[in-house]
Image (cartoon, coloured by chain):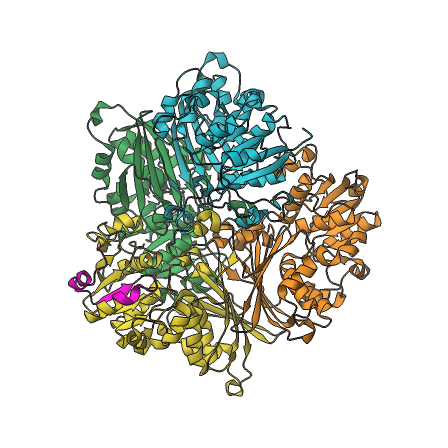
Chain colours: A orange, B yellow, C green, D cyan
Amino acid sequence: MSTNPIKTAVVGASGYSGQELLRLLLMHPGVDLVAVTSRQEAGRPLGEVFPRFRGAAKIADLSFIDPDIDAIAATGAQCAFLALPHGVAYEYASGLLEKGIRVIDLSADFRLNDADIYAEFYGGNHPSPHLLKEAVYGLPEFYAEQIRQARLVASPGCYPTSILVPTLPLVSAGLIDPATIMVSSVSGASGAGKKVDAAYLFTEVNESVRAYGAPKHRHLSEIEQELSLAAGKAVRISFVPHLMPVNAGICTTIFCQPSGDTGSAGKSVADAYAEVYGNAPFVRILGENKFPDTKHVTGTNFVDVGWVEDKRTGRIILFSAEDNLGKGASSQAVQSFNLMFGLSETAGLLNF
Amino acid sequence: MSTNPIKTAVVGASGYSGQELLRLLLMHPGVDLVAVTSRQEAGRPLGEVFPRFRGAAKIADLSFIDPDIDAIAATGAQCAFLALPHGVAYEYASGLLEKGIRVIDLSADFRLNDADIYAEFYGGNHPSPHLLKEAVYGLPEFYAEQIRQARLVASPGCYPTSILVPTLPLVSAGLIDPATIMVSSVSGASGAGKKVDAAYLFTEVNESVRAYGAPKHRHLSEIEQELSLAAGKAVRISFVPHLMPVNAGICTTIFCQPSGDTGSAGKSVADAYAEVYGNAPFVRILGENKFPDTKHVTGTNFVDVGWVEDKRTGRIILFSAEDNLGKGASSQAVQSFNLMFGLSETAGLLNF
Amino acid sequence: MSTNPIKTAVVGASGYSGQELLRLLLMHPGVDLVAVTSRQEAGRPLGEVFPRFRGAAKIADLSFIDPDIDAIAATGAQCAFLALPHGVAYEYASGLLEKGIRVIDLSADFRLNDADIYAEFYGGNHPSPHLLKEAVYGLPEFYAEQIRQARLVASPGCYPTSILVPTLPLVSAGLIDPATIMVSSVSGASGAGKKVDAAYLFTEVNESVRAYGAPKHRHLSEIEQELSLAAGKAVRISFVPHLMPVNAGICTTIFCQPSGDTGSAGKSVADAYAEVYGNAPFVRILGENKFPDTKHVTGTNFVDVGWVEDKRTGRIILFSAEDNLGKGASSQAVQSFNLMFGLSETAGLLNF
Amino acid sequence: MSTNPIKTAVVGASGYSGQELLRLLLMHPGVDLVAVTSRQEAGRPLGEVFPRFRGAAKIADLSFIDPDIDAIAATGAQCAFLALPHGVAYEYASGLLEKGIRVIDLSADFRLNDADIYAEFYGGNHPSPHLLKEAVYGLPEFYAEQIRQARLVASPGCYPTSILVPTLPLVSAGLIDPATIMVSSVSGASGAGKKVDAAYLFTEVNESVRAYGAPKHRHLSEIEQELSLAAGKAVRISFVPHLMPVNAGICTTIFCQPSGDTGSAGKSVADAYAEVYGNAPFVRILGENKFPDTKHVTGTNFVDVGWVEDKRTGRIILFSAEDNLGKGASSQAVQSFNLMFGLSETAGLLNF
């Protein structure tokens, strides 16, 4: 581990992924938290805004500041996490990069390689197409080398991570036909962010489950991008997210069909996972006929994976569980941070 | 409505579907509750076992009795609901039918037409194959005429109802290819019954979601039976149930592909539903791009249905929501009861 | 029961108590729902705003209208329920009464006899002190006769009902010293209303319990008013409400000391309750050493009461459970309605 | 911090406090976990029994063993945590102490100084009265010196901690009259332990709140013992626990009256807390008119305290929030462990 803690800023820390990021950085031995911004909380001490964090040595004298690029740079920050809404992050990314600060963006602003797909899914032209090209998709299990060198990491979305982790190795190995992928995901309420909307009141979400956002959820764009890269051809899938009454956690169920590709003959799902994730500290392959449970991953950076073979129909059904704020957002961003700054990949992340 | 209330018994009333059945019958204007049995609660007044029901006029002097066929018959019962475990119900069904009492069975004992499929999914030979033949599958939207005449109704399972209601009209109309059906359902904890098992403790279920029972859940047998009848050929589907932290409700999401059958040309999903459910009081077709929410159906006999066309992949995705103890069990059984005894189909069921 | 259904309006039906009121009135055999108002939902059909109510015969052709007094009067309404915020209800009450429409107000606008206490707890002068005098406090177990004759009923608050029902008979009988009453209540989230505020988001309320509003919650004013009337002297008590993660239900725990009043010699808590509530259809006295559970009263008009004698300290501890939207608001208002219009007190309220 | 990690055993690790203890010890830098026992899980790897802990370096090769004293001693354990039921712990405590292993007992077996009170509250004669005398009550904010030297620490119960932390400083300072203390606590379901009983099924606990165990809960014995010591005279209080639908957390509300003791003249509640807890790392005094929320302490060793002065009645009302498995059980035991082995008091406990 590097001897000096990395001077780190969190830009936009008043939402749920910002809060989770703070929680992780407060416990991270390699981090010196130098700036935490929030337009709406500027001037207030962290412990007042987040009573949970009172008593953490690192926040003793830390207050929120306005999200000003010069002010952040003046703290000597070497790295900035952006926990800002889509469409807001890119401005800060540009400015901070110009100041020589490496950026890990948790928004969707830099996740797509193709500005046209960005326009299709997010609307409007992307304001920094060159940064879109430069940004590395922050899925450390697949892009570790690029992340180590990256100036700008686009940390993946929660649903994408829960879908890509179980599917990419099987698509790459030619074991499943990516065109047959159909996904049903169930997410906790923090996935909606701290959105003050009647639909997310306790009384509305509790004792309720419903699908939403189908058939063209924005996250499809990055999921299909990565599956297409793995498949070597354009892939389109079906995806239905659901909202359920838990605070955190995504439980993803994926139906697909074997490719029948002779090139994969003899290789099993287990083999493919072992090959890709054998040394991945945060992907826990539970095995065949095992069903991951969100309660075992909440608050952690782990993603658990299981599967069944549905012999009666010839299909394979994959399952994953992760914390939408953890491996689906903030702790995954910290995993990239660890790689970028030469720390142990698990530094600050082995919390249970 | 018939002028005299129907003398009615509930056999096995200490579990969750028994309790829901009692709740509905206590409010039903056409029901005279004459016997309520429970081996473990025998001798105890209903209001003591179910404090919620105190104050209901009908239970003032009613206590649980042992589930004895002669004792039930002695009460003059005209109809008996069986809320017993699978494998226990058939004995009571036989005995009660011999006494001239019409039976509505909520277990799986009589849902299958084919004794071999029963053996495959439930194990062992069916003890009353002739009753298996006689029993009517109690899905009133499809078997109303047979239910009216039936001595023995096999009331459908919770997952099957939530899957068959959205799919049967489309399969019958040739609009979707039944072999492409893949189902992901999410159920509340009461679906597991009042099973005293560590896995169902509050602390284990709360803040947790997980798949279970795949790929060969027992309910597949009746789902595939009905889909095969509608399709005119053997159908096998994929089905994954999940457990989620709500008391009641099933949210079902169904992926499928259009059949491309020219015979269905021009007919839409909306048309097919309108044709079948135009006069069905308990199936609420929400329409395209609408997502049913379990919170709008809990405690009721309604099942809500919506769908989307996933034009990017050519698939149709169907959604339904019901109460697993309501339309998925007890209130649906009461709906059959209403038909059997010449009452209005909605008698005692328009609770919100 | 009167032969013609009562023409009834609900003014301000988009919040939680309005919604619960609608639910009850839809199932009430003696009600003809002629007008339902909501400024924000005006023009929209009821079944669209409240998908849960689709399928109810009564709402087939009913849409929300603007809360206009003339428009309401034009429907021929004989009675109007006001489910409006405090400080808004009084205007509608005045106007509707002038049109000869009897009013049941669920807000706090008319619950206090004393305009000074109103000013102390709610701020500002009461705009209709004469109506304050005329209004009857709608606790049917104590004011049934006055309610029957009333033009204007001020239906009690949720906490007050849960506190007054267990204490009033004991204070009246001189069994407990009202000055020693200390109350800790725990309420479900619907008690906060449909308030779109970050503090009531699912993720904030779930897995959380906290006190709030102490030591001078507004509801103290009506609680102390009624206790003082029962005691024949001014009474002040301590009261701490808590917010907990359930949709509905208030669980109230009351510490107090026997009065040592010789006038009550020989009379027990059980006696005092039997005397007052012997014929009360909605107060269920569970008995000594019994603990009411909110799950047995949610969705109903019942309030359950139990108690223990703490012999080690000489105290009596009382317990009650009710639905804050039921006996604590909407169903209690319907109970008053039944009395006002000569219906059976339980009409439309024996739902379980 | 000591250079060598402390060899540590956990005896009885399959319940909820055992599991929480394991979670904390897995993340504790000063702990070498050498033995984990469970009669029912013996032979199974930790990661299989607790899937959440997979991926923790410390458990890679650790399996549950039978709770055998010799076997535990053979591991070289220097310290053993006992997370066993009341009435079972004392045997292991005796045996392990004889082997020279220091013991931290999370059961109630050694919390009382007086064997007669033990007999009154727990039944039967205490089997090791001499150990009862030796054991130190493990409330580090009050017994730190004794804990440092202790061979046997009796770690306090969850309710007692939540009550003693806010009251002891005020009783000691003569600010409140201990005889006027009345407590209403609301606890999460994990407080009931992993008890496989229908009353604790998800469907029974969810959407439910109820009091239980009053008026003479077993925990009163240790609460009154410590209050009596602080008051210098025998104290009896009233206490009502409630069960609510959250996994973890206790929210405690305490009514009491100022003592009117002239000796305390001029000293405020804030002063008394500052004096006692000024350097206590885990007691967070939120201040007057602040209400602690369980969500800010779950998973941590913090206990948050606030209060209000109820000037209308002259009472003081105190509030606390803690995690019943944290400061109320396992993390508090680790806090004692840190003191016993010369580690920093906060070692392994600054998790958020």
The answer to whether residue B64 is left or right of residue C124 is left
* Residue located 48% across and 49% down the image: B204
Q: Nearer the viewer, residue D136 or B65?
A: D136
The answer to whether residue D62 is left or right of residue D313 is right
Q: Nearer the viewer, residue D75 or A159?
A: D75
Q: Which residues are magenta?
A: B65-92
Residue A252: x %, y % from top left: 57, 60
Magenta includes A288?
no
Q: Is residue B271 above or below residue B240?
A: below
Using the rendered view, name the quadrant where residue B165 is placed: bottom left
Magenta includes B72?
yes
Furthest-top residue in this view: D263
Residue A312: x %, y % from top left: 51, 73
* Residue located 61% across and 40% down the image: D26
* Residue located 43% across and 26% down the image: D223
Residue B250: x %, y % from top left: 45, 62
- Residue C126 makes an appearance in the image: yes
- Residue C345 makes an appearance in the image: no
Q: Quadrant of the C terminus of chain B?
A: bottom left
Q: Is residue B314 above or below residue D272?
A: below
* Residue located 77% across and 39% down the image: A5
Q: Nearer the viewer, residue B20 or D8?
A: D8
